[in-house]
Image (spheres, rainbow, N blue to C red):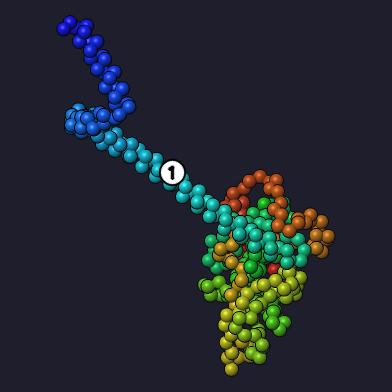
């Protein structure tokens, strides 16, 4: 048989087999058997490609993992920094909200300020704020935070001011017991621990542990009825005419950063100082100054409450 006839016969046989397979599925079993027998051949033929891919994955993936690890470490560092900033902003926002709520209870107007430095003199308790004469601050002005009375301004500089805290041993604060109106003078403790001591309180005075001390308003220096301290100990010595009473300041002396300067209404009218609405920070129009260079240590000329104008 010639080549042409054999080719024609194979073509006709192919068409016949395809027609029979499409109509009656005669070759499914044969096709399954052939695929099963040829599987090892395909597996062996694919070994070089799989080996090459495995080698590439081992070396390339290790390098990529090292680079990705370094990148992730850097991103984690940035994320932690942003988280710390967000936590600090949330805490500061909470403190500012408390300060704003407290300012609404103060008679008169207030100017907000920020503590920017602390005196390094171990014998005194003073802080530096970022408001000065340029912002209308004056000596003797009362300083409050969101929790209680803090002190008063003792030295005014052009753009900053020194504040003497009520826990300083040279400072006396007129207070009264919120429960019964008993009046006393709260002087800063002479011990290392910050606190207050009530001076010249009769041994028969009705003051007990837990009593709230508020400002009495005597001397018109501090706003009346503003929280000052809480009585922590009362000691009665039978041989002494006065009781020894200690109190804990309510103001967060060591933690607070934002404070309020009280501007009484009569001072606004008398001195011509432009008052600011509650919780409004006056604009900084003066040149930026370094607190360490501008703020010199205040002198110790103020040695008594009378000299400070507390009463």
Q: Position of residue 40 (x, y in %)?
A: 18, 32
From this view, report whether residue 299 is shown above or below residue 78: below
- Rendering quarter of residue 153: bottom right
Decide which of 225, 162 is in the foreground and name it: 225
- In the image, is 210 to the left or to the right of 217? left
Q: Position of residue 91 (x, y in %)?
A: 57, 58
Instruction: Look at the numbered disc 1 and give the secondary structure of its residue.
Output: helix
Q: Residue furthest right?
A: 269
- Rendering quarter of residue 187: bottom right
Residue at the spot 53% in from the left edge and 75% down from the top edge: 191
Residue at the spot 63% in from the left edge and 74% down from the top edge: 229
- In the image, is 155 to the left or to the right of 67? right
Residue at image mark 1? 75
Which quarter of the image is occupied by the C terminus? bottom right
Give the total number of marks visible in the rendering: 1
Would you say residue 197 is visible in this rendering?
no
Q: Residue furthest left?
A: 1
Residue at the spot 70% in from the left edge and 57% down from the top edge: 279
Which quarter of the image is occupied by the N terminus? top left
- Rendering quarter of residue 34: top left
Residue at the spot 64% in from the left edge and 85% down from the top edge: 207
Decide which of 175, 304 is in the foreground and name it: 175
From this view, report whether residue 297 is shown above or below residue 4: below
Q: Position of residue 87 (x, y in %)?
A: 53, 55
Decide which of 68, 35 is in the foreground and name it: 35
Decide which of 88, 106 is in the foreground and name it: 88
- In the image, is 204 to the left or to the right of 190? right
Q: Position of residue 268 (x, y in %)?
A: 80, 60
Are there few (<14), some (14-19), or many (20+) residues within 10 Å of tag 1? few
From this view, report whether residue 155 is shown above or below residue 12: below
């Amino acid at each position: 048989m010639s080549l042409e006839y054999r080719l024609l016969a194979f073509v006709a046989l192919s068409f016949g087999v395809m027609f029979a397979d499409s109509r009656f599925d005669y070759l499914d079993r044969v096709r399954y058997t052939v695929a099963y027998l040829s599987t090892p051949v395909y597996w062996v033929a694919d070994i070089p490609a799989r080996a090459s891919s495995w080698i590439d994955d081992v070396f390339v993936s290790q390098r990529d993992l090292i680079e990705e690890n370094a990148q992730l470490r850097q991103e984690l560092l940035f994320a932690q920094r942003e988280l710390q900033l967000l936590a600090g902003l949330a805490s500061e926002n909470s403190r500012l909200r408390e300060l704003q709520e407290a300012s609404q209870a103060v008679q008169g107007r207030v100017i907000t300020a920020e503590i920017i430095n602390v005196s390094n003199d171990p014998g005194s308790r003073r802080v530096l704020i970022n408001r000065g004469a340029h912002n209308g601050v004056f000596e003797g002005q009362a300083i409050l935070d969101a929790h209680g009375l803090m002190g008063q301004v003792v030295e005014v500089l052009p753009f900053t001011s020194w504040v003497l805290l009520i826990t300083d041993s040279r400072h006396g604060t007129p207070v009264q017991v919120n429960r019964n109106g008993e009046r006393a003078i709260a002087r800063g403790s002479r011990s290392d621990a910050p606190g207050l001591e009530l001076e010249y309180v009769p041994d028969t005075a009705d003051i007990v542990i837990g009593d709230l001390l508020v400002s009495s308003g005597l001397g018109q220096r501090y706003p009346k009825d503003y929280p000052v301290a809480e009585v922590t100990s009362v000691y009665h010595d039978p041989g002494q005419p006065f009781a020894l009473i200690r109190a804990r300041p309510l103001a967060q002396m060591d933690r607070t950063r934002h404070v309020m300067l009280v501007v009484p209404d009569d001072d606004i009218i008398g001195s011509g100082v432009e008052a600011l609405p509650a919780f409004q920070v006056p604009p900084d129009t003066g040149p930026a100054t370094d607190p360490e260079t501008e703020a010199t240590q205040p002198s110790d000329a103020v040695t008594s409450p009378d000299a400070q104008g507390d009463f």
